Image: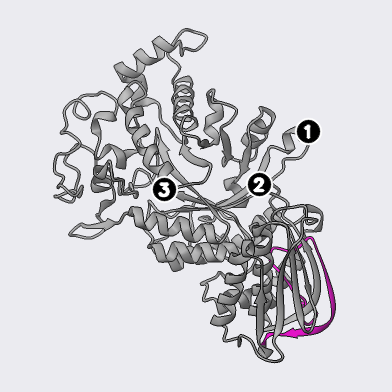
């Protein structure tokens, strides 16, 4: 593979336009930063990186770095950057644009050892939703690691963090009003050893505030996911009365507070209620009872606290992979279907319609609290409000259908695109599960399905990379699975479709961007890209 021309910016994601000029801007001479108050986060990020790199601040020959508010920059996340031998000028109309200009300078400073090519860059994103999801339920990750992932996401101009907080395997969120949820749901038994041990953890209110605050400083919005009605066994560990009625479980188990101390922590290490967080992975038949109004009372309480912690406009409510076996044998669910008229053309109870009704009611709970519901593409199998945002994961067809029906859409198909738990290569030695997704596969993903009319195409908000962690026990493993595929997807979400070039991306990755990741200590995959 040939080398790039010397001192090319080699940014990832690639900018809208970049003209390389003669000369070099050497930050080894020192630097000074001037900015209006609204661009303080950008200036702080830049100065913080320079301090870590040992660049001197001030001096007689210091490079002048000026942030300038320019209302003629039409896109709030766009910017113009002019770098000359003695001065770097950044123009933006919004704080986010100034921040992304700073990230471009940081990338060039990292790979150029403080020497930045003189250039003129004009830039703005293609999509408004440029996301990544981290599953912290299958395995628990410290706040410090989440903050690191946010920093790396911001470096690549991603702006949404989807935080997967509840599952069959864990309930990670400490709630003041319902300590039993994490008390029974945050830890599970690891039975791989002859003597089972407890594993897990939870995020306190202070932990969440720390993550949300740091994300905001990086212009990243945090979207919490509270799974419902399936993938909820960790919730049922503290509230078995919310499961469907069947002999030996919900009808015959203890209350939500059995075996739990005053501080909300399970006293015996296992739920004493008939359910415990799963130590297996897959799809399980026990789900929340759609015929029990107490389910919605609890969800309302949960949302009240979640909304206070997460100021963004969205809450993800799951809605995927919901087996209907329990609903079809539960008297309460059958009665709900009868009363609501949820029957198929033959007059039999229709559990798919019941799921649509259930998720519609969840959407109403969120709308009434000033939030929009996001859900996986199974939401399309029922009737939910048009304000529900659809996350298309089972391919692109769900996204197409949703956009044509008037829903906003986030594209994150699992096959050869956005699921970063899949193997990098089809080799027995490579970690991963359920499929293969090369770096080139991720790079070649196109979020807008072909043939969509303009009105429906405008509904495609963008895309998202998903990191499911069944087989990722440690943060360093997460990094290996994420990078450089997350780099590739950042370019898919940011850069113009017509200018994307995989060979050029591969050159930038090999010659300069890989070096940036190495300097930052990222445990990246280094094998073939396809």
How far apart marks 3 and 2 lie (CA) works out to 25 Å
- Which callout, 3 or 2, points to the residue nearer the camera? 3
How many neighbours does mark 1 have within 10 angstroms: few (below 14), some (14-19), or many (20 or more)? few
Rendered position, 209 above or below 509: above
Q: Quadrant of the N terminus?
A: bottom right
How many neighbours does mark 2 have within 10 angstroms: few (below 14), some (14-19), or many (20 or more)? many
Q: Quadrant of the C terminus?
A: bottom right
Rendered position, 52 above or below 104: below
The x, y position of residue 421, in whole percent, is 50, 55
- What residue is at 25 percent from the left and 40 percent from the top? 237
The x, y position of residue 265, in whole percent, is 20, 50
Indicate the quadrant where residue 3 lies. bottom right
First in sequence: mark 3 or mark 2?
3
Identify the secondary structure beneath mark 3: helix
Do callouts 3 and 2 mark residues in contact (Cβ within 8 Å)?
Answer: no
- Which callout, 1 or 3, points to the residue nearer the camera? 3
Q: Is residue 468 left or right of residue 2?
A: left
Identify the secondary structure beneath mark 1: loop
Mark number, residue 453: 1
How far apart marks 1 and 3 lie (CA) works out to 38 Å
Instruction: State the residue position of label 3.
Output: 309
Instruction: State the residue position of label 2.
Output: 462
The magenta stretch is: 1-27
Q: Can the viewer see residue 428 in this picture?
A: no
First in sequence: mark 1 or mark 2?
1
- What residue is at 32 percent from the left and 32 percent from the top? 298
First in sequence: mark 1 or mark 3?
3
The x, y position of residue 60, in whole percent, is 70, 92
The x, y position of residue 19, in whole percent, is 84, 71
Residue 359 within the magenta-colored segment of the rendering = no
């Amino acid at each position: 593979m040939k080398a790039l021309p010397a001192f090319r910016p080699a940014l990832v994601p690639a900018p809208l336009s970049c003209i390389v000029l003669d000369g070099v801007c050497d930050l080894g001479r020192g630097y000074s930063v001037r900015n209006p108050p609204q661009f303080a986060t950008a200036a702080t990020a830049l100065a913080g990186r320079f301090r870590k790199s040992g660049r001197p601040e001030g001096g007689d020959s210091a490079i002048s770095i000026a942030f300038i508010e320019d209302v003629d920059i039409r896109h709030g996340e766009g910017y113009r950057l002019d770098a000359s031998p003695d001065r770097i000028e950044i123009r933006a109309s919004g704080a986010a644009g100034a921040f992304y200009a700073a990230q471009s300078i940081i990338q060039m400073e990292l790979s150029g050892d403080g020497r930045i090519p003189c250039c003129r860059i004009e830039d703005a994103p293609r999509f408004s939703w440029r996301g990544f999801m981290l599953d912290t339920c299958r395995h628990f990750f410290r706040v410090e690691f989440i903050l690191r992932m946010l920093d790396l996401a911001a470096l690549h101009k991603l702006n949404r963090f989807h935080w997967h907080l509840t599952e069959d395997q864990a309930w990670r969120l400490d709630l003041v009003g319902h300590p039993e949820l994490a008390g029974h749901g945050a830890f599970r038994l690891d039975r791989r050893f002859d003597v089972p041990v407890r594993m897990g953890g939870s995020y306190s209110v202070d932990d969440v505030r720390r993550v949300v605050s740091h994300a905001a400083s990086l212009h990243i919005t945090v979207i919490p996911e509270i799974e419902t009605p399936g993938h909820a066994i960790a919730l049922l560990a503290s509230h078995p009365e919310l499961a469907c009625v069947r002999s030996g479980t919900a009808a015959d188990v203890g209350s939500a507070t059995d075996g739990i101390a005053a501080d909300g922590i399970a006293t015996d290490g296992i739920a004493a209620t008939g359910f415990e967080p799963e130590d297996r992975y897959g799809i399980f038949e026990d789900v929340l009872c759609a015929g029990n109004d107490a389910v919605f009372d609890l969800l309302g309480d949960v949302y009240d606290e979640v909304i206070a912690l997460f100021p963004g406009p969205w809450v993800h409510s799951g809605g995927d992979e919901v087996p209907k076996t329990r609903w079809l044998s539960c008297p309460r669910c059958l009665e709900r279907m009868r009363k609501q008229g949820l029957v198929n053309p033959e007059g039999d109870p229709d559990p798919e319609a019941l799921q649509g009704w259930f998720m519609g009611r969840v959407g109403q709970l969120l709308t009434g609290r000033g939030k929009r519901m996001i859900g996986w593409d199974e939401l399309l199998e029922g009737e939910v409000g048009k304000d529900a945002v659809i996350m298309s994961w089972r391919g692109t067809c769900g996204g197409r259908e949703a956009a044509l029906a008037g829903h906003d859409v986030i594209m994150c198909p699992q096959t050869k695109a956005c699921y970063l738990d899949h193997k990098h290569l089809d080799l027995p030695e490579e970690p991963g599960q359920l499929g293969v997704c090369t770096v080139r596969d991720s790079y070649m993903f196109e979020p807008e399905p072909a043939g969509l009319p303009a009105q429906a195409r405008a509904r495609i908000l963008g895309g998202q990379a998903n990191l499911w962690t069944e087989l990722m026990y440690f943060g360093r493993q997460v990094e290996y699975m994420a990078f450089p595929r997350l780099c590739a997807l950042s370019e898919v979400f940011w850069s113009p479709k017509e200018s994307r070039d995989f060979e050029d991306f591969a050159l930038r990755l090999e010659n300069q961007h890989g070096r940036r990741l190495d300097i930052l200590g990222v445990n990246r995959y280094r094998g073939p890209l396809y």
